[in-house]
Amino acid sequence: MHRRYVKVLEDVLDANSTIAAANREDFERASVKVVNLMSAPGAGKTSLLERVLARLDGVRVGVLEGDVQTALDADRIASLHVPVVQINTEPRFGGECHLDANMVRSAIPALPLDEIDLLVIENVGNLVCPAEFRLGEHHRVMVASVAEGEDKPLKYPLMFRACELVLVNKIDLLPHLDFDLERFLGNLDAVHPGVDRLLVSAKTGEGLEAWRDWLVAAAVREASRVA
Amino acid sequence: MHRRYVKVLEDVLDANSTIAAANREDFERASVKVVNLMSAPGAGKTSLLERVLARLDGVRVGVLEGDVQTALDADRIASLHVPVVQINTEPRFGGECHLDANMVRSAIPALPLDEIDLLVIENVGNLVCPAEFRLGEHHRVMVASVAEGEDKPLKYPLMFRACELVLVNKIDLLPHLDFDLERFLGNLDAVHPGVDRLLVSAKTGEGLEAWRDWLVAAAVREASRVA
């Protein structure tokens, strides 16, 4: 069973890369830069978008929401009057645990690419498989909540290595947690030395100006080597 | 690509069920009851085990640790002088995002089944795929951290439906979060009406007696219908 499974998954990843390249071409033809935003469930991806999307200094942004089920996050983003398209992975195989390039491809016709400069793709909450599946993005960002503990970079190194920016979220909770920030950042540097990181709190607003500035710059920045 | 992928995954799930049944037979032959413990990354599975494993009232317990990488959790459990076996999914396909029955099967020879009454399998941190892959367990428990937000039962319904007990962890953080516990429990009942739930804090110890009592009872309880 196992060998066949691995072979098919390798084929799937190859096909995914081909489709991701086609997506990238479509995005570049429309001069749209794309950010793939990933995290564990409940780390705060949607909240961190909600807090900055309306203040992007003239950068026109759209959002592609990936979830196993529900349009809860898309509804939150739409209330900001930002164009948003929802992908639910549920109608597929029992709910895929990640977005893949083909799902994004199927959503492209619904995206107003000519009217935006920046597309943020909010991936399914998962620290494993989303790191494997390129979507055609230029930039990859992950959110790590301090409530998840210091050991996560060591336990999910592929995800932490696959990103060019790590948003360390919920820092307002630090006084209430047994979380050693220095140890977490040491673990982060152990798996991805020197990766950019921002300490943020969607609740208090701390660090959100820097996150907004990063997104504004991403709209014109060349694709990252890790994307 | 997609249809072939789905077909192969269906085959994989079929094969998984067959192997899970063989695992279950091995466990029953040794009179060992098995709990599959699941959650998102950083919800507190290991901490909730650490706090009760040494106080199980004569129930002899062993632990099978599943992680993409590292033996960090196994080391924490081993320090309690509890027999523990580590499975790392990393040598397989880029790090599987869940345990499957075959991984558990490969670990059975290393488990002292004749010397334990209860085996706790700590799954890979993920709210999607672990719910799909039966391991041969009798009971399925999940941990939901209040730091993850109220919407998680709606967004990951399969996981919340697949369990007979939901441990609502980190309730010590409630005063510091915008988390509406009643709304969370309403969402939980919407996807899995009346499922057992315990409000716990691995940090303050609140609710841990009930969690310990549940584990002690699980060592003699018949398999759940949801397992």
Image: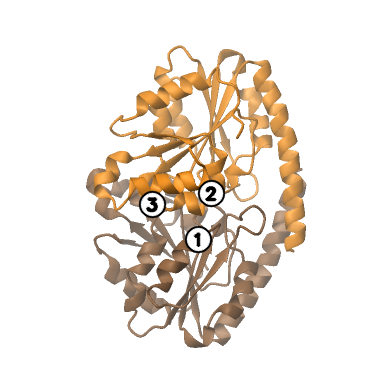
Chain colours: A orange, B brown
Q: Secondary structure at mark 3?
A: loop
* C-alpha separation, residue under disc 2 versus residue under disc 3: 14 Å
State which mark lies toward you, 1 or 3. Answer: 3
How many labels, in total? 3
- Give the labeled residue for mark 1: B162
Residue A168 left/right relative to B115: left
Q: Quick one: A163 or A183, which is closer to the camera? A: A183
Closer to the N terminus: mark 2 or mark 3?
3
Q: CA distance from mark 1 to mark 2?
A: 28 Å
Classify 10 Å Cα crowding around label 3: few (below 14), some (14-19), many (20 and above). Answer: many
Going by the numbered disc 3, the residue's amino acid type is: Gly
Q: Amino acid at mark 2?
A: Pro
Any mark on residue A149, and which?
3
Q: Position of residue B146 (x, y in %)?
A: 34, 50
Residue B202, percent from left and from top: 30, 61
Whether discs 1 and 2 lie on one chain: the answer is: no
Which numbered disc, 1 or 2, marks the residue closer to the eye? 2
Secondary element at image label 1: loop
Left or right placement of residue B189 versus residue B136 in this view? left
Reading the image, the residue beneath label 2 is A157
Q: Is residue A118 above or below residue B34?
A: above
Report the residue that reaches farthest toward the left. Answer: B175
User: Which amino acid does the dot numbered 1 rest on?
Assistant: Ala
Q: Is residue B135 visible?
A: yes
Q: Is residue B213 above or below residue B113?
A: above
